[in-house]
Structures are given as structure tokens and as C-alpha cells.
Image (tube, rainbow, N blue to C red):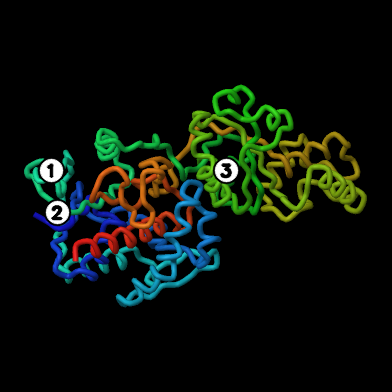
Amino acid sequence: MFDVIIVGGGAAGFYAAIQIAEKAPDLKIAIFERGKTVLSKVKVSGGGRCNVTHGEFSPHELVTNYPRGKKELLGPFHKHAPGDVMSFFEQRGISLKIEEDGRIFPVSDSSQTIIDCFIAETKRLGVKILKNSAVKRIQKSENGQGWQVTTMNRHYIGKKLLLATGSNPKIWNQLAEMGHTIIPPVPSLFTFNINDERIRGIQGISVDASVEIPPKKAFSSKVQIKLKSALKEEPILESEGSVLITHWGLSGPAILKLSAWGANILHGFNYQFRINVNWTPEYTTGSMENYLWKVKETETKKTILRTRAVEIPRRLWTNLVRESGIEKDLKWSDVTKEKLQKLALQLTACSFKVEGKSTFKEEFVTAGGVDLKEINFKTFASKLLPNIYFAGEIINVDAITGGFNFQNAWTGAYIASQAIAEDLR
């Protein structure tokens, strides 16, 4: 018999357990983890450095990074935000740093620092950790006051149940059987697979660019794009930021933003669509064409291939010039209007065919989960099932990359923990 059973030995589960134990030290708390190791997602976060949160301290600005959950998280972020998370770790002897892009990491640059902190704190506070304890069944206890949790070998009773299981279909299925609405999960953070000569062999290049996904007319009826928008050729999705050329296609913050905001649309496209990249976002196609005419007039004797007219990496410039049909020895003075127009298009409206996706590193994030309408965001409790609470990715909240998904986990875990501890004291 436990006072609190937490299902899921990840970031949200450990954070909640520590918060409950500190607020109500006499409670018996257990974390159930289905695997043989805990905190595996923390381990790989931020390339192994653990991007614990983001240095955005205004709740109104913070919520703009959540394609799903923006409205619901505003109140919770007023109660527990990045500053509170930083205080939590710093009070436990972990120094943090805010990098130029706003991401926050331990000064050690090692996720193990965060893992060691969680393990030490749960041990100090007497929280029981049960590994290899996949939950097979959740049902009301015989007295109807709590919940019976069944693993492979045993039955456990908990007065309160906190589900922090992430993207776990088995738990979602059980919740659906008990009456909850589960929004079907789809991948959220992913990179785009592109096989194209213009970016082949130049992996590692990063460019500040604007990117957009134009309407897919053949698919418009399925995703219910407004016909008016489709006729105007207005982009379905657009983003701006760093675009990274990789072995398999395109990645980087601008691409990841598109993947998050367009998670459901791109899933509907079966990850087959076109993307337009403006490698020089300060220019339109028209203004670029005018600019190239000026270059033609001033650099008459130089070859186009060797004269990088805009501030993009030389290898990318070379590939775009070749794609425009410009020979390697062609001088600016001899270039035709048609070829300059083609080069302007390559620089400002470079169209690629996307054929599939790849997971962003090991940081797999999904859109979908428990319907937000069925959660009380003052306590993160289920509105349908008494004494059940949620935290983390199990609910239909997801964010762009940069520490925001962890912040959702910390905030939900904290608010749920306070409600649980207060109710059981």
C-alpha cells in the first residue's frame, strides 16, 4: 500500500516524487518504471548535456513555443516556470548556464549531473523505485478510494496515482477504456529527408533562412485547407531560423519548428511534400534579381561561380549556381537574363521534395495524448477519474526544441505534486 504511486521513471515522475516527499515527508511514495533503467530520456537530452529548460521567463512568451497546450499552460507557468526549475537544481548544488540561444544546461555539460541529482534526492527522501515494473492494468481498488496497479507479478494499491508515462500506447489504451479521450499520437520533432544534388555532399553547413511549405493541392480535401488560401498559394506553414544541411536532408531549428507546428498536417501528407527555402531571407525573388543585375554590371570580368554575390557558404553557392545552368567559366558580363532569374529563384525560392522524416537525434516527441479538455490545469488531475493526475508528454502538449518539453514536464509534475501532497497531509 502506497500513498502515491507514480507510473513512469522519467523527468516528470522523479520531479514529482521529490516535490511530494519534501512537502509531505511521511507519505509512502513509489515510482514504477517499466525498463531496467530510469531517466533514459534525460540521459540523451540535448546531445547528452540535458537541456533542462529555456531562459524565457515571461509565461506569455513561454507559451508561444507550444503548438499544443499554449492556452492551457499559461496559468500553470505563472505557478512554476523556468526560474523555479533553475532554483530547484541550484538549491541542490547544480550550477546552470544560459546559452546564447536561450537553452539552459548544467555547467558540467553532462546529463548525468541531473540524473545523479534525482537519484540522490529520491534516495534521501525515501522514495521507492521499482524498475522492470511495467504496469499491465490500472483499476479502482476494492474500497473505491484508490487505485490498484498491477505489474507482471504483483498488485499494488495507491491512494493517488500520477501517470507520467510519456508516449505509452498501453497506458493510453487503458485510459481510453476508462473513458478518457486520447488524441491519436503523431511525431512532432523530426527532420526532413531530402535526396537532392543541391545539398548532397555539403552536410554540416548551417544557414539562417526562411522556410515554408506550400499548399498540397492534391491533399487539400484531406487536411481541409481553405480553398481561398490554396488559390493564393499562401504557405500552409512557415518558419525562420537556422537550417542545417545533413547527410539525409534538412534539419536545424527552422525545420524543427515546422515539424512541431505542422505535426498533424505533415502526418496527413504521409511526410511527402515540398518545402521552399529562401537562403537569403532579406531578399524576395524580385529584389534578388535586381541585385544580381547590379552585380552583373559591376563584376563584369569575374566568373559567377567564383564570385559569391551573397553571404551564404561557398559550397552552397557553388551548387545553386550550377543548378541554375551557369557554366563554371561563365562571366557576369555574359550571363543571360534567364539564367540570372534562375539563380534568383534558387537563392530565394529553392524548392525541395521531402520524402520521409527522421527522428531528431534520440529526442522523440509526439503530439497527441490525453485530451486537454479532460484535465484540470489547476491540479493536473483527471476530470473523469478521481485521484488520477498527469504530468509530461502523456497529455496532448508538445513544444519546439530548446528545453520547452522538459518545462512542460516540470510544471505539470510540480502542480500535480502540490495538489497530491496537500490532499494527503
Pointer 1 residue = 151
Q: Residue at x 40, y 56 (%)?
A: 408
Q: Residue at x 66, y 50 (%)?
A: 209
Residue situated furthest right in the rendering: 297
Disc 3, disc 2: CB below 8 Å?
no
Towards the viewer: 211 or 414: 414
How crowded pointer 1 is (Cα within 10 Å; few <14, some 14-19, many 20+) is rated as some
Mark 3 residue type: Gly
Q: Position of residue 219 (x, y in %)?
A: 58, 24
Q: Please tell me which of labels 2 and 1 falls first in the chain.
A: 2
Spatial separation of the CA atoms under disc 3 and disc 2? 48 Å
Pointer 3 residue = 201
Q: Position of residue 233 (x, y in %)?
A: 71, 32
Front label number (3 vs 2): 2
Towards the viewer: 137 or 194: 137
Q: Secondary structure at mark 1?
A: loop
* Residue 229 figure quarter: top right
How crowded pointer 3 is (Cα within 10 Å; few <14, some 14-19, many 20+) is rated as few
Q: Please tell me which of labels 3 and 2 falls first in the chain.
A: 2
Disc 2, disc 1: CB below 8 Å?
yes
Spatial separation of the CA atoms under disc 3 and disc 1? 50 Å
* Residue 409 figure quarter: bottom left
